């Protein structure tokens, strides 16, 4: 599984954080191949279920 970390070290003024409405750290987004947001800030079992759901589509 590929995991990318993105930062321009601009804190909350960072354009990528603004475009994805990131308001806290840590934060995570689950994106599809086209870059669409499938889920935001899932952890543990909820994240596993969502990934499995997407893979089985």
Image (cartoon, grey):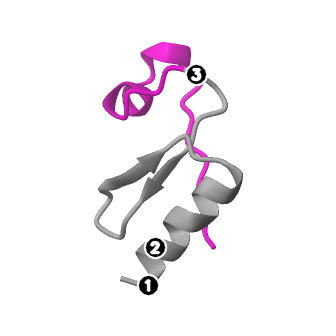
Tell me where residue 40 appears, x and y as whole percent.
47, 43
Tell me where residue 31 appears, x and y as whole percent.
41, 58
> Which quarter of the rendering shows the N terminus?
bottom right
How far is the residue under mark 2 from the one under mark 3?
A: 26 Å
Residue 56's label in the rendered image is 1
The residue shown at (46%, 27%) is 22
Instruction: Decide: few, some or many residues near mark 3? Use Cα within 10 Å; few <14, some 14-19, many ≥20.
Output: few
Q: Nearer the viewer, mark 2 or mark 3?
A: 2
In the structure shown, which secondary structural element does the residue marked by tag 3 occupy?
loop
Q: Is residue 48 above or below residue 42?
A: below
Residue found at the far bottom of this picture: 56
In the structure shown, which secondary structural element does the residue marked by tag 1 occupy?
loop
How far is the residue under mark 1 from the one under mark 3?
A: 30 Å
- Does residue 57 show up magenta in the picture? no
Residue 53's label in the rendered image is 2
The residue shown at (44%, 15%) is 13
Asked if disc 2 and disc 1 are in contact, CB closer than 8 Å, the reply is yes
The quarter of the picture where residue 24 lies is top right
Q: Is residue 23 above or below residue 16?
A: above
The quarter of the picture where residue 21 lies is top left
Residue 24's label in the rendered image is 3
Span colored in magenta? 1-23
Residue 3 in sight in this render: no
Q: Earlier in the sequence, mark 1 or mark 3?
A: 3
């Amino acid at each position: 599984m590929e995991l990318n970390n993105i930062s321009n070290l601009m804190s909350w003024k960072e354009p990528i954080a603004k475009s994805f409405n990131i308001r806290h750290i840590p934060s995570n987004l689950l994106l599809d191949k086209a870059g669409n947001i499938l889920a935001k800030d899932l952890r543990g079992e909820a994240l596993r279920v969502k990934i499995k759901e997407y893979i089985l589509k």
